[in-house]
Amino acid sequence: MTDIIPSESSTPAPESRRDFIRELVADDIATGRFGRAPATRFPPEPNGFLHMGHAKSICLNFGIAREFGGTCNLRFDDTNPATEDVKYVEAIQRDVQWLGFQWDALYYASDYFEQLYDIAELLVQRGKAYVDSQNEEQIREGRGTVTSAGTNSPYRARTVDENLDLLRRMRAGEFPDGSHVLRAKIDMAHVNMIMRDPLLIRIRHAHHYRRGNDWCIYPLYDFAHGLSDAIEGITRSLCTLEFKDSREIYDWLVAEAGFENPPRQMEFARLELDYTILSKRKLLRLVNEGHVSGWDDPRMPTIAGLRRRGVRAEAIRAFAEVIGVARKDARVEIATFEHAVRDDLNMEVPRVLCVLNPLKVVITNYPEGQVEWMEAQNYPHDVPKTGTRTVPFSRELWIDRDDFMEDPPKKFYRMSVGREVRLRFGYFITCTEIVKNDAGEVIELRCTYDPETRSGQSPDGRKVQGTIHWVSAGQALDCEVRLYDRLFAQPDPDDVPEGQDFLSALNPHSLVVVSNAKVEPSVGSDPVGTRYQFERTGYFMSEPESSTPERLVFNRIVGLRDSWAKELKKG
């Protein structure tokens, strides 16, 4: 069972952020272990969009380079032509730069195919690799189990000349897919099953998005990854814990290839986030099966999706800093991430008035045709930013339907018949009458106002407990509001009954579209992509793909508080 990182995390002081990896890098510098400046890399495979787990790795690798005066490369581990595409390359570069980082050099594993092939021949010549002609199933069966040793391939005893001949003919394209593979010759009884003659190169007649049809043999990840690091002069290869068992083959290959003072692999805990899937394979399934609109759907945990939803890069970097880098897997509460998003937006975005579920209010003693312009603060007093705007006030207003109850319970301090409430930046009003339609639904409230309480001030000092938001009916702008929520309805989407998969945990309410919301007119001329706090509602951004001055659309970035915690307590 993994640990839980609580949501009420505060940003640690700079001196407390030194994690075990940074301590290693500091020691590398102090001892001159590598004889060169720290060099890291971020090496994604271009077969999908980056997600929050990648963001953690990006912040770590690029952050170390910044902090210790080193370098960080962006390298695409593009050794699988069947799944990779230039569109993913472009998306990954865009995401890294949007997060606030710039690579020192841009590389592709496919640029090293010639060098990797030369190393393969070197291993064969030294008796460290051989061509195996077994099929995939035979190879898998021959590896044994964690409690029993594997068995040698019948082709393991081929001579160097035979292996070289076969390898060169593989390279020349003489053989079909699956007929031969190149394997390291290590130990079929090794306690680490990865070291039982791992596969290094396979035949795959496929078009590569960069190399075209130049190659029909492709290195496997374990073969290409460590050697690419060594070719680039990386000092610390930082990867997540699932690659811990691969460290031995990493070290074996760079040593057998003859690299002096090679890079050292170090593992850290990957990100496991509640209510979220961070498997690229599963995310691809969500896209391909139409459960989301695409990789940049605002419900997706991809960087593109978070950006479209309205999350700022600063919040993602702050989140990565708060959760830190650990040696042990720990499940992070999504509330921790949402807290980072709110904390970032609270200091940056202006407040505006928007009514999601409009209910008409008519102030019967307010002059017909009169419009006043009320001064409204853009930011609260505890935010460094300042500024004001004016909002119109008139006889007819919209308030949120949730702010009225005909028969309210105790501690309901909003509007009901006979109760006085304060309108934000406006007047005190009292509901005197309700109007219903033939179905018995409340469609209008008739109220009176106290003209002595402009801007919410009371000359006689009387107290009003409830303050509600509103917009002027005549000047408000129509808008669509997309209420995005967690994509999954339970903390661990994989924890489902037998016979079901993670899709059964999808949250049916992850997107609720409000088509008849009303927003104050001050936002009408703002550029697309502007973020706001809709007072008493949450943080929103005008939708970058579909919002126009004629048709305003807003995405909810995050609510003002964690409403799910309350629901979980109820359960």
Image (cartoon, helix red, strand yellow):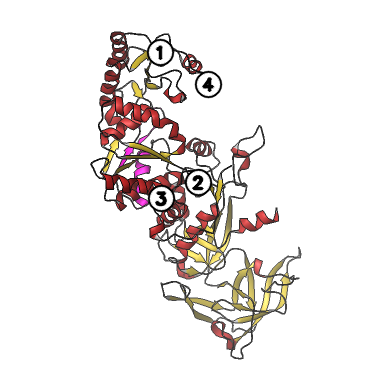
Q: Check disc 4 and give the amino acid type.
A: Thr
Q: Which residues are magenta?
A: 73-100
Query: What distance separates the C-alpha of mark 4 from that of mark 1?
Result: 24 Å
Q: Secondary structure at mark 4?
A: loop
Residue at (55%, 65%) from the top-left corner?
518
The residue where tag 3 is placed is: 19
User: Between disc 4 and disc 1, whose residue precedes?
Assistant: 4
Neighbor class of circle 1 (other Cα within 10 Å; few <14, some 14-19, many 20+) is: some
Q: Check disc 1 and give the amino acid type.
A: Ser
Tell me if label 1 and label 3 are in contact, CB under 8 Å. Answer: no
**Mark on residue 179?**
1
Residue at (48%, 14%) from the top-left corner?
138
Tell me if label 3 and label 4 are in contact, CB under 8 Å. Answer: no
User: Between disc 2 and disc 1, whose residue precedes?
Assistant: 1
The residue where tag 4 is placed is: 145
- Residue 83 in the figure: left or right of residue 216: right
Residue lying furthest front in this view? 31
- Residue 93 magenta-highlighted: yes
- Residue 292 in the figure: left or right of residue 258: right
Near-viewer residue (362 or 242): 242
Q: Is residue 478 above or below residue 92?
A: below
Neighbor class of circle 3 (other Cα within 10 Å; few <14, some 14-19, many 20+) is: few
Give the mark toward the camera: 3 or 2.
3
Q: Check disc 2 and give the amino acid type.
A: Met
Q: Secondary structure at mark 3?
A: loop
- Residue 56 magenta-highlighted: no
Give the mark toward the camera: 1 or 3.
3
Q: Check disc 3 and give the amino acid type.
A: Asp
- Residue 241 in the figure: left or right of residue 406: left
The residue where tag 2 is placed is: 300
